[in-house]
Structures are given as structure tokens and as C-alpha cells.
Amino acid sequence: MKYEIRRAVIEDVESLANVIVESWRSAYSSIIPENEITKFLDKQRRQQQFKRFIQDEEIILIGICDGIPCGLVFANKDNDEQLEECGSIYSIYLLEEYWGKGLAANLMDVVISILRDEGCRRVSLWVYEENVRAIGFYEKYGFTFDGTKKHSRFSNKPIELRYILDI
């Protein structure tokens, strides 16, 4: 499959919201309680978030295959943990039918290149411990678990693991 990866623009907010909402349904239905996940599935709310992020010039890339928006990555050259010269990947989501078909690696390649150009020497991300499929992708890509764990804000307190990649 051939993908187009580009920076998202305001006109993409509906597509971005669709990708994140549908991928949350696919990826987290067995991790996050149903009564709590539903508030994250509001496409209007997600559109407003992405509009704000794009206006603030955050790093948001959209992946398109045959004209269909099917993936996204959201990152920043800063991080919440005060790690030196370390950018953060906050979200990387794909529609389920594109899992395992090379899109995630393409998105990752482009976002890491951008973060490197912005002066980052490392990249961090958090992943649910139960999200074995995603962990497998991150480890195959070269990320390593640095030993840091935290409990998620959801009522069942799923554990999140921090992964780091030297770039």
C-alpha cells in the first residue's frame, strides 16, 4: 500500500476526529470501561481539539491511502516529564483495517524526522500495558521500556508504560 503522509490542516479535523474515535473503539474496548470510553468518542469534541492543536502549530500528521484518511500521529518537541532533549508522541492511531500494513511505521518515520529536526535526541510515548499489539509495534520500531509506569486516570486504573527511543 502507498500512503501519503502530510501535516494536517484545519480542513482535516473531521477526518482526524473520525480516525481517533474509531481507533479508540477498536483498540481500547477491552482496556477502558465502556461507560468511561464513551466520553472520548465524541467526534465534535475531537474536531474542536484538533482544530486548536492545528492552530497552535502542534505536530499533527495525517496518513491517507487512496484518498481515505486512515491514520494520524500527534507529537510535540517538548514532553511532560522534563526529559532532556526529548520529544513526545502523544497519539498514533490508525483505522483498524490499516493495522499491520505499514502505515504506522510511515507515520513514525516522518514524525521522528520532524522531532529530530527540531532538536530532539530522544522520543517518549506512553502505552497501556494491556495493549500488546501496540507494544509489539513500538519494540519492533526500536522503542524500549524505560521502567517507568503510571496508573491511567480511568476507574479500573490500567497501567501505562513509558517507552523511549534514541533518535
Image: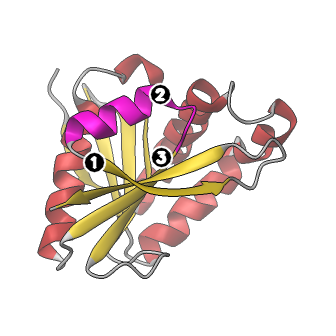
Q: Position of residue 110 (x, y in %)?
A: 18, 53
Q: CA distance from mark 3 to mark 1?
A: 25 Å
Mark closest to the chain's N terminus, 2 or 3:
3
What residue is at 33 percent from the left and 47 percent from the top?
62
Mark on residue 153? none
Callout 3: SS: helix
Closer to viewer: mark 3 or mark 1: 1
Give the left or right position of residue 46, taking residue 143 as reference. Answer: right
Judging by the rendered image, the residue that carries numbered circle 2 is: 132
Q: How is the image coloured?
A: secondary structure
The span picked out in magenta is: 128-141
Closest to the observer, 30 or 106? 30
Q: Quadrant of the N terminus?
A: top left
Residue type at mark 2? Val
Count of numbered marks: 3
Across and down, in percent, residue 99 comes to 36, 23
Label 1 crowd (10 A; few <14 / some 14-19 / many >=20) = many
The residue wearing badge 3 is 16
Residue 135, picture quadrant: top left
Of the pair 73 and 81, the residue shown nearer to us: 81
Q: To which residue does mark 1 refer?
A: 143
